[in-house]
Image: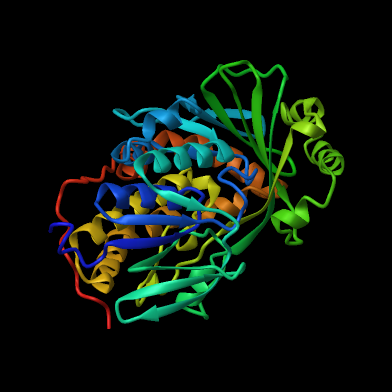
Amino acid sequence: MSSNSRAVRSALVIGGGISGPVVAAALHKAGIEARVFEAYPGPAYGIGSNLALAPNGLAALEIIGAADAVRAIAAPIRSQSMAVNGKIIKLPGISGVEPLQLVDRPDLHAALHDIAVAAGVSFEYNRRLVEVEEHADGITAHFADGSSATGDVLIGADGIRSTVRTLIDPKAPGPQYLNMLGFGAYTRCPVDLEPSDMTFAFGKRAYYLYWVMPDGRVAWGANLPHPQYLSLSEARTVSNEEWLRILRETYADDTPGSALAQATQAADLQVVGALHIMPPVPHWYRGRMVLTGDAVHAPSNTSGQGGSMAIESAIELARCLRDIEDPATAFATYEALRRPRVEGVANRVKRMNHTKAAGPITRAFMGAIMPMMFKRMDPEKTFGPEQHFRIDWDAPVRAVPVRA
């Protein structure tokens, strides 16, 4: 279909984190004008700590020419282990894929922003969406500062607390709190680990993970059990010194958890806030609005696939809008392509979320069965369908019927 006959010529993208810049760059590649509107003041506003990008996510970034820019700011992880009750269990890998890439979320946001801008995408900041107005041939977004913008479609890439999701369906489920708060830090501390190795550790009171950076620093992340929900802003009202005191107490009986917490300086602690998952969202689209990324699917960080799933969905949404004239049909086709895959990833790790704050009885059970479980695991069967997946950008998308 030529650009002159395309029904969708412009898109308003709400959210400038991960999926927003990716879908905007992919739309530009498809010949569709995309503008990104972000509520925060800039592209890298200190939100979050590290995240992992799997081989399938990097492959999707290749489509918009962003993969090398991300690899340049990431640390490759070539092997992984699990520590339970002092036992180190080597985790099986799969063949024929590049290493997992660990990247700071603010750095990733900045890199994806720069790639999208280089592709011709415009960004506007301090634009918090408050309402939309649909027309027969377009949609207008209204922002809290009184400004507005009009396009053919509106894409909600506005994260787990998505405003667009509630505009599509006021009864849509919100994120589920996992009763844990997230923290990340870099420190200098001797650990028995080679660079590019990562260990997932089930401590006596809480889960944590750690790896050695290429420059010798140790990066680590903590999932602190915390029954009281705290948003990012609420968690950051507590001083880093106080959070560090709590973390040192929590990991006091763990090796090397205790040493990592003791060696960390308050200034180097990154408070992530509440950890969530998204339950299945009944309605991915309505009218000229559609969701992508964490706004519609956010698996637990245990999956190692959250960022990669967001990137894949953004690329697939752009393909559907490129090839299908009717927005509703394009959105229905996009959902049909993506829902089974993202919900499959979420289901794979659902049970793992409960083990991160396991009690002594559960930990003893885990230590007994995990070595046997991983010995019997077929990594190609478990992880292969996720990590070997590749999007064929040039293949035409076949439309599916719009749901009733």
The location of residue 243, given as percent across then percent down, is: 82, 43
Q: Nearer the viewer, residue 322 or 37?
A: 37
Residue 92 in the figure: left or right of residue 31: right
Using the rendered view, name the quadrant where residue 244 is placed: top right
Horizontal arrangement in the rendering, residue 99 relative to residue 220 (left or right): left
Residue 348 in view here: no
Quadrant where the C terminus is found in the figure: bottom left
For the view shown, which residue lies furthest in the front direction?
Answer: 147
Rendered view: 256 above or below 147: above
Q: Position of residue 89 (x, y in %)?
A: 53, 29
Residue 289 higher or lower than 342, as above or below: below
- Identified at 19% across, 69% down, the residue is 400
Residue lying at 27% horizontally and 46% vertically, measured from the top left: 29
Residue 14 picture location, percent across and down: 48, 61
Pick whichever, 342 or 171, lies toward us. Answer: 171
Q: Count the labels in the image.
A: 0
Q: Above or below — where is 371 with respect to 256?
A: below
Is residue 65 visible to us here? Answer: yes
| Quadrant of res 53 | top left
